[in-house]
Image (tube, rainbow, N blue to C red):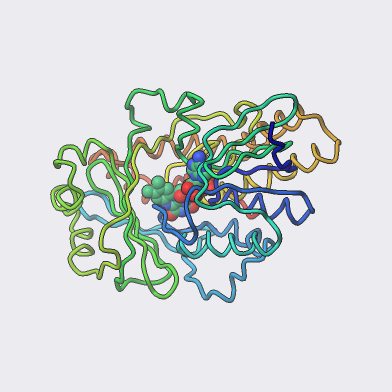
Amino acid sequence: MKEHKRYDIAIIGGGLAGLCLAIQCVEKHYNVILFEKEEYPFHKVCGEYISLESWDFLQTLGVPLPELNLPIIKTLQVTDAKGEAYTFNLPLGGFGVSRFSLDSLLYHIALTKGVEICTNSKVNSIEYNNEEFTICSLKKTVRAKVAAGTFGKRSNLDIKWNRTFTRQKPNSLNNYIGIKYHVRYNHPTDHIYLHNFYKGYCGISKIEEDKSCLCYLTTAQNLKNCGNSVSEMERQVLYKNPLLKEIFDSAEFLYEEPLAISQISFDKKLQVENHVLMLGDAAGMISPLCGNGMSMAMHSAKLAFEKIHLFLINSISRRQMEKDYSETWKRHFFKRLWMGRNVQKLFGGEVSTSLFLKSMHSFPLLSSLVIRSTHGQPF
Ligand SMILES: Cc1cc2nc3c(=O)[nH]c(=O)nc-3n(C[C@H](O)[C@H](O)[C@H](O)COP(=O)(O)OP(=O)(O)OC[C@H]3O[C@@H](n4cnc5c(N)ncnc54)[C@H](O)[C@@H]3O)c2cc1C
């Protein structure tokens, strides 16, 4: 039988969680392999507003953020489905950068530092046997002591493992679609806008080179009701918010077609599956209106690395590593996800969104509590 190459760590999925974990591992001289099914650089459906909590962490990994001259965002303006606007201060704030640029920067850092990266390599199976994982991708099969599942919100492996969220019937926390464009549109650089419409919301904020990311989340049902046509849905549903109509009418759209994803779920997930540590969206996805899924993905990579390192230097057992990671993940993110799920449920209904925004605006303590409890601290 063919002898497969052995690694300390195999990482499945090269988004933010996977790349951040890979860089930390290689810096400690572990033997790391990362599989990504796409080829860098590539676009992703994402609002591209990153909470400032991850600024320092990204710099420690080698991303030269100050040199990139990125927009810093401090103010959130939300409109209800009729276009009535409410403005809030973001206590920590964020910055804007495209996933095309950020993921590719991290990819190059990881490569330079010595991570073995297999692109165009979809992993089809991860098996655990005798204290070792066997990972099979389209291109190669390898063995590893530790496996990290960083494959995002929904992948072929979730279906294969029959994870609970893939079996849920449509409910208020699943079956969403996401659509993204890059546009040129004149608006203040330090503002992020969240425009509501029936059963959805659309964010717009600046990224690099004075471009803006325009990205929305809505139900699959909205699309179905409009004959599965995105442009028809925009005309029939999104344009009812006058501010959104104005953006769609006057912005310059920089892609031929929008980028789209479906089957987005905010249902609960487990943080360890079949002995694989799950990170980022694969461990639990926060509603995009909280604007910190990316920071959570990177933070989970930092938390996982601490436990993996202890396991690899034989300070803790595998069982302890899995238990500690799961507990520390919950301690950091459980409340945020709970709050995110509840806020997500309130958005989308014309009356509930309007009432929620009015109360948030009238009671600054409430808005500050909601914003703080959906965000973390720098890590
Ligand atoms: C509409 C929308 C808007 C959002 N807006 C924001 C925002 O403004 N701010 C924010 O902070 N967060 C936002 N998010 C959330 C954010 O995009 C995610 O939380 C973040 O991308 C999670 O990173 P990740 O590394 O876990 O997953 P991903 O970045 O999705 O990376 C997973 C990677 O795994 C790869 N992969 C999957 N399966 C396999 C396989 N079998 N083999 C090999 N590779 C595989 C994929 O190609 C992908 O590159 C938004 C999400 C949505 C849906």
Q: Is residue 108 left or right of residue 362?
A: right
Single out the residue that lies furthest toward the front. Answer: 1
x and y percentages locating residue 243 in the rendered image: 22, 60
Q: Nearer the viewer, residue 79 or 8?
A: 8
Residue occupying image coordinates x 40% and y 67%:
206
Whether residue 329 is situated above or below residue 232 in the rendered picture: above
x and y percentages locating residue 202 in the rendered image: 31, 53
Q: Is residue 27 left or right of residue 253?
A: right
Quarter of the view holding residue 303 = top right
Q: Is residue 360 left or right of residue 348?
A: right
Quadrant in which the N terminus is drawn: top right
Residue occupying image coordinates x 59% and y 43%:
140
x and y percentages locating residue 33 in the rendered image: 66, 48
Q: Can residue 295 be spotted in the picture?
A: yes
Q: Nearer the viewer, residue 60 or 21?
A: 21
The mark tally for this picture is 0
x and y percentages locating residue 238 in the rendered image: 20, 51
Q: Can residue 281 be spotted in the picture?
A: no
Residue occupying image coordinates x 21% and y 40%:
222
Residue occupying image coordinates x 80% and y 40%:
312
